[in-house]
Image (tube, helix red, strand yellow):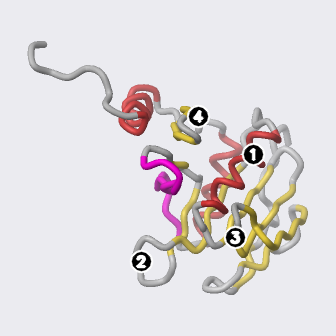
Amino acid sequence: MIGRRLLPRSPRELARMISRATGLRVEVLGGSLVLSRTDCATRAEVVRRLAATLPAECGVPVAMPMDPDDFAVPDLVVRREGGGPEIALVVEVVARQEKAREMVQKNDWYAVACVSALLVVDPRHGTWMLGTRPRDGRYGETRAGRYGQDIPLPAPLSRSLSTSGLPRYGA
């Protein structure tokens, strides 16, 4: 094809191309491409159930402030009331093959991006962790619990999120 540009101009553009071609979730963190599968039925069911109870969007990239090409794609994004770019909550459902170090590192990325609250749901162990009050690249306050315990969401959501009946891997 004459005149058609085949090579991407940036990591962000390469990520978009890979995602379209493969269906994988592709993120750029610290200049590195991070690919993950999204086809696990258990993970998809956890995301579906949480999305049904939250005013959430799926597949929304969250820009990372250190590099214009860096972005993460959480499972769910809840914007502050009235829309706009400010994010009240992101939800990450831990993949079956996720390595703990990778997840902790990603949590820090959201805090650096000043995402107000991060909810990590882990179907491997039936647990959850809620980080709030981002400051200096870390969440200043964290709460953790097990499936069956409600998650107390901070303002502006200011309500509890039920975890009863969320599926676990291998269950």
> Are discs 1 and 3 less than 8 Å apart at CB?
no
Magenta segment boundaries in residue numbering: 56-68
Residue 146: x and y in percent read 90, 62
User: Cα distance, mark 1 to mark 4?
Assistant: 12 Å
Marked residue nearer the N-terminal end (4 or 2) = 4
Q: Label 2 is placed on what type of residue? A: Gly
Q: Secondary structure at mark 4?
A: strand
Q: Nearer the viewer, mark 3 or mark 2?
A: 3
Marked residue nearer the N-terminal end (2 or 1) = 2
User: What residue is rendered at 76% in x and 37% in y?
Assistant: 98
Return the residue at label 3: 134
User: Cα distance, mark 3 to mark 2?
Assistant: 20 Å
Q: Label 3 is placed on what type of residue? A: Pro
Determine crowd level at label 1: few under 14, some 14-19, many 20+ residues with C-alpha closer than 10 A: some
> Are discs 4 and 3 less than 8 Å apart at CB?
no
Return the residue at label 1: 103
Q: Nearer the viewer, mark 1 or mark 3?
A: 3
> Are discs 4 and 2 less than 8 Å apart at CB?
no
Return the residue at label 2: 83
User: Cα distance, mark 1 to mark 3?
Assistant: 16 Å
User: What residue is rendered at 78% in x and 51% in y?
Assistant: 167
Q: Is residue 58 magenta?
A: yes
